[in-house]
Amino acid sequence: MRRRKLKEKIFTALMVFSTVVVIGCLAAIILTILIKGAAALSLDMLIKTPEGGYYIGKGGGILNAILGSLALGIGATFISAAISLPVVFYLNLYRKKRSKLGMMIRFFLDVLWGIPSVVYGAFAFSVMVMLRLPASLLAGMFTVGLVIMPIMARSMDEALKMVPEELKEASLSMGATRLETALKVVFRQALPGIITAVLIAFGRGIGDAAAVLFTAGFTDSLPGSLLRPVATLPLAIFFQLGTPFPEVQERGYASAFVLMVIVLGISIAARMLSGRFTKHVVK
């Protein structure tokens, strides 16, 4: 009995320690970025586009990068969702749980999840060179969509696995087709998890720099066309921190803080939306 209590105390202490480390790391990152970028944070930075020489210390802001990141992230998320949803519904409604094809698809999704985003960027760039396509918002959307697709698909897959089999069987026994069961029963029950998967993937995509370095390009203009280059916050941060000018480096940290606030806001929204729809879930 004493040994069991000792183990419980040890693992409780480890969990508390791990929680403190995670929260401490997050607080340290936020404080470091905020302190180093506080001097450069201003309203002009958020509402203005870069003027001539912005990346060597002259006037302007990062509005082009903020809007470009949002446009690219939203477009990539829609592309990824259009691929992920049919795949996960097929795996959970049209295939048996332990089917060889289903296990193979899940394995390949896990492999795709582990591939570095720079590899996706290099692949997309090689395709663009072969087809003689210029860097553009559309190319960036497709590239980032491929990067976040396995993340979204596997997260959705786990959400659909949590739907009780009895609900599916009850729907099918009452004469509903598999498609009707998928859309009217399974989708509704898995909606909190699906929303969380979509927003997490969006947060992952909006912060990616390697995948868009050669595909989306960069511009000081606001996004106005799918076929033109677009600025993104990760690349804006990369360019600013890579300069030898301390003032521009401070702007880079301020840009990083803006990006972090966007990602944190997405995470909070995911929690709130997930909690809102959880009350309709049958457990």
Image: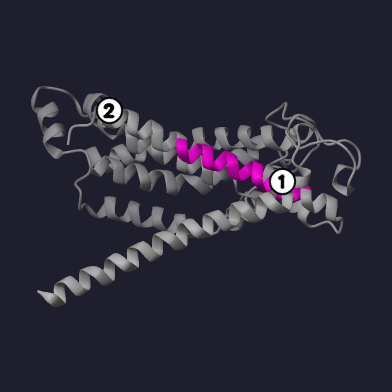
Mark 2 neighbour density, 10 Å: few (under 14) some (14–19) many (20 or more): some
How far separated are the C-alphas under marks 1 and 2?
40 Å
Q: Residue at x 25, y 29 (%)?
A: 279
The residue depicted at 91 percent of the width and 38 percent of the height is: 52
Residue 142: x and y, percent? 58, 40
Q: Residues within 10 Å of mark 1 (few under 14, many from 20)?
A: many
Amino acid at the residue labelled 1 = Ala
**In the image, residue 33 above or below residue 174:** below
Which dot marks residue 43?
none
* Mark 2 secondary-structure assignment: helix
The residue that disc 1 covers is: 254
Instruction: Tell me: residue 79, above or below residue 98.
Output: above
- The quadrant in which residue 246 appears is bottom right
Instruction: Please give left or right for residue 274 compared with residue 259 in the image.
Output: left
In the rendered view of the protein, which quadrant contains the C terminus?
top left
Tell me: 39 left or right of 194. Answer: right
**Residue drawn 58% across the image and 37% down it:** 73
In the image shown, does 144 or 59 lie closer to the viewer? 59
Give the percent coordinates (x, y) of residue 93.
23, 38
Asked whether residue 37 is in view, the answer is yes
Q: Is residue 262 magenta?
A: yes
**Which quadrant of the figure has residue 223?**
top right
Residue 118 spot, x, y in % from top left: 61, 57
Identified by mark 2, the residue type is Arg
* Region rendered in magenta: 251-268
Residue 101 colored in magenta in the image: no
Q: Residue at x 78, y 51 (%)?
A: 250
Mark 1 or mark 2, which has the lower sequence index? 2
Numbered badge on residue 188: 2
Residue 220, x across and y down, in percent: 81, 36
